[in-house]
Amino acid sequence: MWSWVAHRVTGVLIFFFLFVHVLDTALVRVSPEAYDEVVATYKTPLVALLEYGLVAAILFHALNGLRVIAVDFWSKGTRYQKQMLWAVVGVWVVLMIGALYPVLGHAAAEVFGS
Amino acid sequence: MSNNTVKTDTAASGIGPVEGDSLYSVDNPAPVIEPPRQRTKKTPRSTRGNFELYAWLFMRLSGVVLVVLVIGHLVVQLVLDGGVQKIGFAFVAGRWASPFWQVWDLLMLWLAMLHGTIGLRTIINDYAERANTRVWLKGLLYTATVFTILLGTLVIFTFDPNIR
Ligand code: HEM
Ligand code: HEM
């Protein structure tokens, strides 16, 4: 039940991000300066935190989506849906720890100085 | 316990005291229940297509492909080669010089937008209870979808590294 709510919420979040993301990418047709200026905001610590959140949303939606697909198409899917949910949570935690440094490393260095 | 007495006693209510014991006989036939959605001369065939089935299937097929496309995209943009710090006009120019990444981005754009739009359509159908609200929200949604897909496609096809 909670996984279904989370799947919904993350799906909507990703959709709204994608809408804005296509708009910001379209600035490459305006001028290199306009594009670089907007992308510069992506490199600030606060937005880096948002990017980490986006990664969290996508990884959960993707992993849980694969679980939903397995439940629908795999003959034993329904029987193992609970175990698969724990697998989703486990893989998600591992990947989120792995993403810490690549996504937040630069921001951390900027905020805490190094 | 005599079956006969039970039948005559409770036939009017239609409920027998023993589960699985038939209440009906030749003299006391069960009421006829018409099959729902029976085809008549006015509605000879199914009047609806299989749209919902195809939408359901598309969500799953596109989902599998999107796992590769979107997570690959995130690794390229956020992890490899200095992460988000390297992104700029020159970086995009370098990537879209390759037809491989052009096709990658194009496919990701179309699949993610259609997948997200069908998903939001389901959510609108679930929560917007008034018919009017539903029509307006979906109209807004489809307008945004067509606009975004067209803009994104145009940007990939008309990208000009020598714009300045
Ligand atoms: C914060 C994370 C992200 C960053 C930094 C990022 C960065 C970029 C960049 C630099 C481009 C330009 C083309 C290229 O280099 O391939 C691009 C294009 C694109 N990205 Fe992302 N991206 C992110 C997340 C996402 C996500 C989550 C999605 C899908 C849901 C997505 C979908 C797309 C699409 C469809 C295009 C092509 C846009 C167009 O046709 O104009 N991106 N992205
Ligand atoms: C990364 C790979 C992805 C996978 C494996 C995936 C998988 C799925 C699946 C299987 C469903 C159907 C759930 C159901 O019928 O109960 C779904 C729903 C949905 N997805 Fe995705 N998806 C992915 C990416 C995306 C992206 C990029 C977006 C946004 C643009 C998105 C937005 C949605 C929305 C809004 C729903 C509807 C949620 C609902 O009805 O509760 N998904 N996804």
Image (tube, coloured by chain):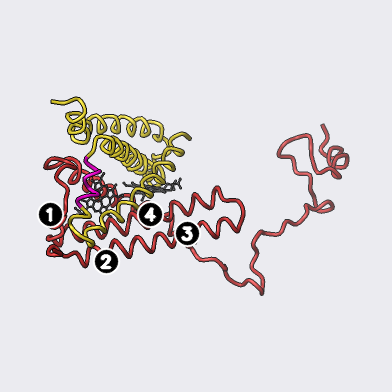
- Which tag, 1 or 4, sits closer to the chain's start? 1
Left or right of B52 in this view: B21:
right
Q: Give the residue at mark 3.
A: B140
- Which tag, 2 or 1, sits closer to the chain's start? 1
Gap between marks 3 and 1 measured at Cα: 35 Å
- Label 4 resides on the chain identified as B
Relative depth, front residue between A2 and A46: A46
Indicate which label's residue lies in the foreground, 2 or 4: 2
Q: Give the residue at mark 4.
A: B115
Residue at x 17%, y 46% (from the top left corner): B76
- Which tag, 3 or 1, sits closer to the chain's start? 1
- Which tag, 2 or 4, sits closer to the chain's start? 4
Q: Give the residue at mark 2.
A: B154
Q: Position of residue A2 (x, y in %)?
A: 46, 34
A37 part of magenta stretch: yes
Chain coloured red in the rendered structure? B
Indicate which label's residue lies in the foreground, 3 or 1: 1
Instruction: Give the residue type that dot 4 points to.
Output: His
Residue at x 63%, y 71% (from the top left corner): B43
Under tag 3, what secondary structure?
helix
Q: Is mark 2 within 8 Å of ligand 1?
A: no
Residue at x 14%, y 58% (from the top left corner): B93
Chain coloured yellow in the rendered structure? A
Instruction: Give the residue type that dot 2 points to.
Output: Leu
Gap between marks 2 and 4 measured at Cα: 20 Å
Q: Position of residue B110 (x, y in %)?
A: 31, 59
Instruction: Give the residue type that dot 1 points to.
Output: Ala
Q: Is mark 4 within 8 Å of ligand 2?
A: yes
Gap between marks 2 and 1 measured at Cα: 19 Å
- Label 3 resides on the chain identified as B
